[in-house]
Image (spheres, rainbow, N blue to C red):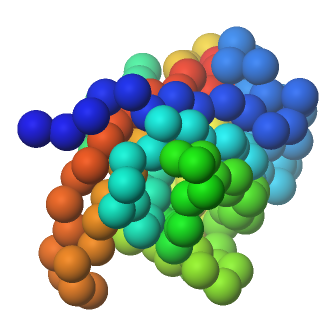
Amino acid sequence: MFAANLTAEFLDSAWDGKHIPDGQQCQEFDGAGATPPLRLSGLPDGTNAILLFFNDEDYEPLSTGGGHGIVGFEVAPKDGRVDLPAVPGGTTDMPDGVWLEAENRDDIGEAGYLAPCSGGEGNLYSVRIEAVRYLDDDHYDVLSEGYLQLGRY
């Protein structure tokens, strides 16, 4: 059992949880999408990583389990809080302390995190957040979970 009091908020005011900001769609639709920068609060003691599972809730093949990719961040929370930077989509080249836990499962040819890519059909995009403690390279304990609606595109 884990704590469920993890909260997330956008650090960029262009993200409002209702609509995906202009330009934050996938390359196929002329975007240069990146993950939104986030502030996470309520992280339990022992958290040493965050996993972000990006999903398109309206497109069944990518609706769960990080269909648009799973991005990991090494973290050292202060007072149960951490800020996560934006990470570019369409690439496997990640900044220091960031990794791809899993690439997107779509077949359009974009690597890594796949930014919203419904072509403006109004699909709902979200991120499931896990605060974890990595025990080794292959094993971790989930300490807390959260959810954030990214918006529609």
The residue positioned farthest toward the left in the image shown: 1
Q: Would residue 148 be found to the left or right of residue 132 on screen?
A: right
Q: Quadrant of the C terminus?
A: top right
Nearer to us in this view, 125 or 49: 49
Would you place residue 148 above or below residue 32 in this image? above
> Depth check: 102 or 29 in front?
102
- The residue that appears at 54% across and 67% down in the rendered structure is 75
Picture quadrant where residue 147 is located: top left
**Vertical placement of residue 6 versus 115, above or below:** above
The residue at 43%/65% (across/down) is: 49
What residue is at 74 percent from the left and 48 percent from the top? 37
From the viewer's perspective, tell me whether residue 94 is left or right of residue 71. right
Does 19 appear above or below 52? above
Residue 109 occupies quadrant: bottom right
- Most extreme residue toward the front is 79
Q: In the image, residue 137 lies at what x, y percent? A: 26, 86
**Image location (x, y in percent) of residue 111:** 55, 71
Q: Please state the horizontal and vertical placement of residue 127, each as a whole percent of the image.
A: 48, 37
